Amino acid sequence: QTQRDTRINTVMQFTARNGISTDLRNEVLDYFEFRYSNPSADFAKRFMDDLPSEMQARVISQMFPGALEKSGLFKGASEMFISQLIVKMARRPVPTMPLQVIIAQGSYNSEMFLLKSGSVEVTTQDEDGQQRRIRSLGPGSTFGDLSMWMDSRQAASVTSLDFCQLHVLTRSDLEDALLSFPEVAHVIASQALAHCLRTPGMAPHLEGLSVATSEKMGRRLAYNRVEFDPGIALYIEGEFADAAYVIRKGKVESELLGGRLEGLEDMRCVGFDALLTGWPYQETVRASGAVVAYRISAQDIIDLFTNDFELLVEREEVAERWYLEEKRRRVAMTWALLAEDILSHHRKQDEEIRQLSRTPVVTSSTQEEHDQDLAARLRRTLAVSQSNQRASDLRRSSSDSTEPPLRATSVVSRSSSGHSGGDQLPLYVASTIREHHEA
């Protein structure tokens, strides 16, 4: 009891010191009071660690009869592989309180949960904020399977309805187990890819895909694992579709309308609408980081649907509806960009007019001073030119004494017949000043 109280006081001090709100602080305290008053989870981990491996395996098999059978992700995996996963899960117990959110919709999660006792509820929230109940799960159920295998957002929230005992399998646990059973990697990938193709949020252009068809496509995809470095294009806008991809790790960037509009989207299945219709890609998709994906080609589609032409036609019709809907959306984007260009042009013109309106007005006295300064500068320029011309004529006369010396002729004397010097400017200089004023 003393140790429990000490822990609770430490939690209270920590939350108060770090500015945690009162409501959240009370929620955290409730959880830790429940956690510290229920030492069975800590004991279960210590108990498993103290057992010999062989005895541990037998105990776990009786603690979790038929575990992971309800998870489609491990369908077809060997019993030894499943046993190794269960051993890892047994060492990660997680107790929960009633109404505790285990998985939040829209979050990224790399864990799969096995429900040992208690019950949970699966719900989704639509764009209007309305909650919709999907189903309830009881002991022996699993959830979070697909998100553990691939980087994807959670499609639904999972909340405990009462006191629950969960066991957790992490992505790193799965990858460690696959090092000992590499042959299982393809089995798991095919099941995960099939599930991904059937998920509307990940592959809306494959809406209504049957389990059998998705599993056939999943097996073909699993054999074509590809990797892309950052910036490499998976496919390019305008090219006719020859492949589609399912993204397992990393993110891709969608460039629309020749790269003018870019969006970093949480896309998992890309290019399927163009591939199934045989039309050009409507966007350029690039890896925004290191990407691991699975590829299916046009030839794969032909091979898969050779004996089921009606099903292929059905898939093409669904993909065509999605493709045309996307095309209409892109046309709307094009008009929006054009309108923005026009508005930007007008804004630029308005700014130029404002800048001109802020230019000070030149008065008549200021204009007269400006004219005199311009005339003085022109006189200096003409004098230098005249001096240079005379020096050139003298050099020529000294080098050739037989020829009569050339008459030094300036621009001023050529431009004004009978000009007597003085302060009056030549006609072409006056014209230059007038043009300057008009400009």
Image (cartoon, grey):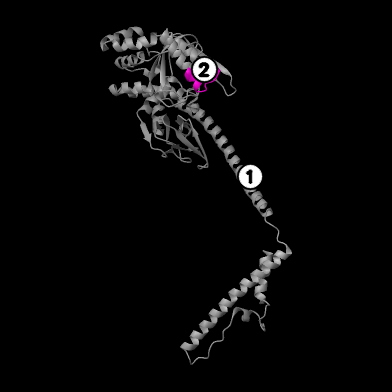
Count the marks: how many?
2
- Which one is in front in this view, the residue at disc 1 or the one at disc 2? 2
Q: Which residue is mark 2?
A: 25
Q: Which quarter of the rendering shows the C terminus? A: bottom right
Q: Which mark is residue 68?
A: none
Q: Position of residue 160 (x, y in %)?
A: 48, 12
- Asked whether 272 or 333 is in front, the reply is 333
- Asked whether 308 or 279 is in front, the reply is 279
Q: Which residues are magenta?
A: 13-24
| The quadrant where residue 379 appears | bottom right
Q: Which quarter of the rendering shows the N terminus? A: top left
Q: Position of residue 153 (x, y in %)?
A: 47, 25
Picture layout, residue 99 above or below residue 381: above
Residue at 37% over, 15% down: 92
Q: CA distance from mark 1 to mark 2?
A: 50 Å
The amino acid type of the residue labelled 2 equals Arg
Q: Which residue is mark 1?
A: 343
Q: Provide the major secondary structure of the magenta segment.
A: helix
Q: Say left or right for 177 vs 140.
A: left
Q: Is residue 22 magenta?
A: yes
Q: Residues within 10 Å of mark 1 (few under 14, many from 20)?
A: few
The amino acid type of the residue labelled 1 equals Leu
